[in-house]
Image (cartoon, helix red, strand yellow):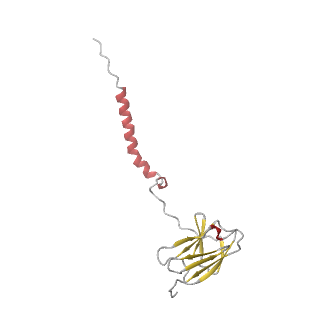
Amino acid sequence: MLNPPVADQGPRKHRALRLGIAAALLCTLPGCAMHWPTVHWPWTHRTPVAAQPVSELSVEGDERILQYWNRNALQVDLTGMTGEGSAVLRPTHGWPVRLEFKVQPGSFGQLEVVGSQRAVFDVPVQGKPTVLPLAPGSYALDTPQIVIRWTAAAGSER
């Protein structure tokens, strides 16, 4: 008698092969993830690098005033200032497009900025350091200098 035809086992073999490949991929993914830089994962963030001081403006009046780039805005750091004082800012290579001031709440009461226009900011009494952005029309490209004045908080003994 002739041997009966054997049923084609192709689909079973292909299904087993596909399951084996899928299982192998699932087992290797965690191992690959350990070797990828953390930059590729959207839920992880790199430790922010401390901002480096720059010298885009010449500052006359107080050497403790530092400048930093905060994205595309030049940030003038006034967190070390207390009581009353003033400074004159002049561009060394031209004015930055955006200018902002970082202040420490409670260290002084008001910040006055005089360029093409005058802007007055009330400094919060308490909290974390605050950034006060200067409006775009407050100074023009041909403004020779910007004068900043900070005054003591009302009722302060500083």
> For the point 60% across and 63% down, which residue is it?
72
In the picture provided, is 123 more to the left or to the right than 21?
A: right
Residue sitting nearer the eye, 125 or 43: 125
In the picture provided, is 2 more to the left or to the right than 145?
A: left
> Would residue 78 be visible to someone looking at this image?
no
In the picture provided, is 113 more to the left or to the right than 27?
A: right
What percent of the width, then of the height, locates residue 44? 45, 57
Vertical side of 71 occupied by 128: above or below: below
> For the point 30% across and 16% down, which residue is it?
4
> Would residue 13 be visible to someone looking at this image?
yes
Residue sitting nearer the eye, 149 or 70: 149
The residue sitting at the left extreme is: 1
What percent of the width, then of the height, locates residue 89? 66, 75
What percent of the width, then of the height, locates residue 40? 48, 52
> For the point 37% across and 40% down, which residue is it?
23
Vertical side of 55 occupied by 81: above or below: below
Quarter holding the N terminus is top left
Q: How many marks?
A: 0
What percent of the width, then of the height, locates residue 151? 57, 82
The residue sitting at the top extreme is: 1
Residue sitting nearer the eye, 102 or 112: 112
Residue sitting nearer the eye, 3 or 64: 64
